[in-house]
Amino acid sequence: MDFLVMGAIDCTHIKNNSPGGAQSESFRNRKGYFSLNVQMVCDAKLRIRNIIARWPGSVHDSTIFNDSPLCAQLERGDFTPMVLLGDSGYPCRPYLLTPILNPRTPAEEAYNRSQIRTRNPIERLFGVLKRRFPCLHYGLGLKTTNIPPIIVACAVLHNIAISRQDEVVEEDDPLTIVEEEIMVQPSNETNQNFIVRTSLVNTYFSG
């Protein structure tokens, strides 16, 4: 089964002040601070190919993806044979390949190593983006409604910088943030959801 990797997907939290009101606690994320949970897809060159910046910090990554236009397009097969790579916070689907939670064979372990290496650009992107625009690291003390356009503007400017080869040195310091993965057990999964991943393991990582 031939396919192409269109990019890696993940979410990152952008700090903000409590918006107040009845819905304010929905912005408090699992680490205890207020944020927006921003979904991005990037390619191997760290170019941002898709972004959604409107969800409160308490919303799970998979919920954001399932509600996104990108998910609907993938469900329709608009990008076949291209697939996304995601961490274990996402459900495995024919168009979204995730790590195997409990690898039992050398082939599955090899697949996991390859999958993690190939989706590494999304983790690097978050560090580069927050270094390039420190406001995304330290937080935006603005009205909540004004924050999403600023995040999207930063993404556009980042892509322009990439196109002009204005690179940011990647260093392991406080601005290089690696988001934690939330390991979740699949629910309501079907064999169809795993068919591409299983075929990939058997074809390229066995023997």
Image (cartoon, rainbow, N blue to C red):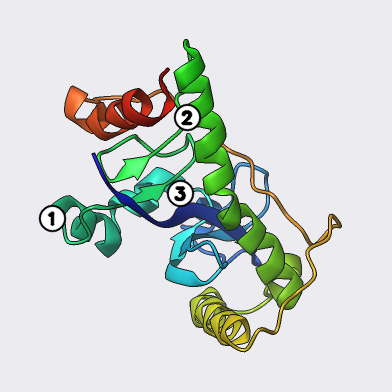
Q: Is residue 165 above or below residue 118?
A: below
Image point (44%, 25%), residue name? 100
Going from the N terminus, do you reach mark 3 or mark 2 first? 3
Foreground disc of the pair 1, 3: 1
99 and 28: which one is in front? 99
206 and 157: which one is in front? 206
Image point (49%, 82%), residue name? 149
Going from the N terminus, do you reach mark 1 or mark 2 first? 1
Foreground disc of the pair 1, 2: 2
206 and 101: which one is in front? 206
Going from the N terminus, do you reach mark 1 or mark 3 first? 3
Instruction: Tell me the distance, in whole angstroms, between the alpha carbons under discs 1 and 3.
Output: 25 Å
Residue 102 seen from this side: no
Query: What x and y, as percent, mark residue 142?
Result: 63, 79
Question: In the rendered structure, which amino acid carries the disc numbered 2?
Answer: Tyr
Numbered circle sitting on residue 111? 2
Image point (66%, 84%), residue name? 165
Q: Which residue is mark 3?
A: 59
Which quadrant holds the N terminus?
Answer: top left
Q: Is residue 47 above or below residue 66?
A: below
Q: Is residue 21 above or below residue 205?
A: below
- How many marks the image carries: the answer is 3
Image point (13%, 55%), residue name? 76
Instruction: Tell me the distance, in whole angstroms, between the alpha carbons under discs 3 and 2.
Output: 29 Å
Numbered circle sitting on residue 76? 1
Foreground disc of the pair 3, 2: 2
SS class, disc 2: helix
SS class, disc 3: loop
Q: Categorize mark 2 by other alpha carbons within 10 Å: few (<14), some (14-19), many (20+).
A: many
Question: In the rendered structure, which amino acid carries the disc numbered 3?
Answer: Val
Question: In the rendered structure, which amino acid carries the disc numbered 1?
Answer: Arg
